[in-house]
Image: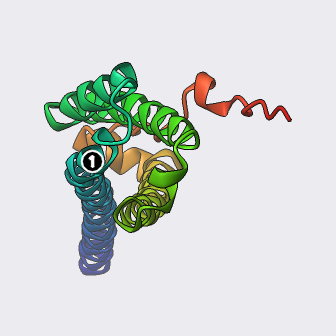
Amino acid sequence: MLLWIGIIIVILIVFFLLIYWGFYNKIIRTENRIDNSWAQIDVQLRRRAELIPNLMETVKGYMKHEKEVLENVTKARSALMSAKSPQENIDADNVLTGALKSLFAVSENYPDLKANQNFLNLQDELTNTENKIAYSRQHFNDSVLAFNNTIETFPGVWFAKRMGRKTREMLQIPEAAKELPKVKF
């Protein structure tokens, strides 16, 4: 009888260790997926920042008196390039997005610029990059959701507490960016 109790205890210990091992690996994998997702966002933000000087050079010749718009784009790009944390990166990215919207809105006043092939190519590249950024943000939020679900549901919550893991925040759109643009004819 004592032998059977010992075997049952060993089986329970092995079973518990296998479950712990599985949840430990799952938590680590989902954290790594979050880090990878953030790295992909960072790559696309850097790519966009690298396209901007070319766009600016193309636009400068046409918009000599639109100095403020050009300066805002340059400042926003510099802030993005010098961002240290993910939150600084997101804040700088939001400012840059607004500055680029202003730049493209002002470009509407310059028919020659709108017809310039170099400008059109750069605008297309930026549009493609914006789409990649949006997809990367979605993937990041999906990864955070998977991680948070893992560590907030049972039995993951129990393992996460012992591992010192806390929920991660999803990327949020600032309230100002949620406002619909006003279109007037």
Q: Is residue 56 above or below residue 175?
A: below
Residue 93: percent from left, percent from top: 36, 36
Residue at x-position 25% and y-position 61% = 36
Q: Is residue 169 left or right of residue 37?
A: right
Q: Is residue 26 left or right of residue 50?
A: right
Q: Quadrant of residue 129?
A: bottom left
Residue at x-position 45% and y-position 52% = 113
Q: Quadrant of residue 139?
A: bottom left
Residue at x-position 28% and y-position 66% = 29
Residue 177: percent from left, percent from top: 59, 30
Please say whether residue 88 is visible from this viewpoint. yes
Give 179 or 104, whichever is nearer the viewer: 104
Q: Is residue 95 above or below residue 121?
A: above
- How many neighbours does mark 1 have within 10 angstroms: few (below 14), some (14-19), or many (20 or more)? some
Residue 180: percent from left, percent from top: 74, 33
Tag 1 residue: 52
Give 114 or 172, whichever is nearer the viewer: 114
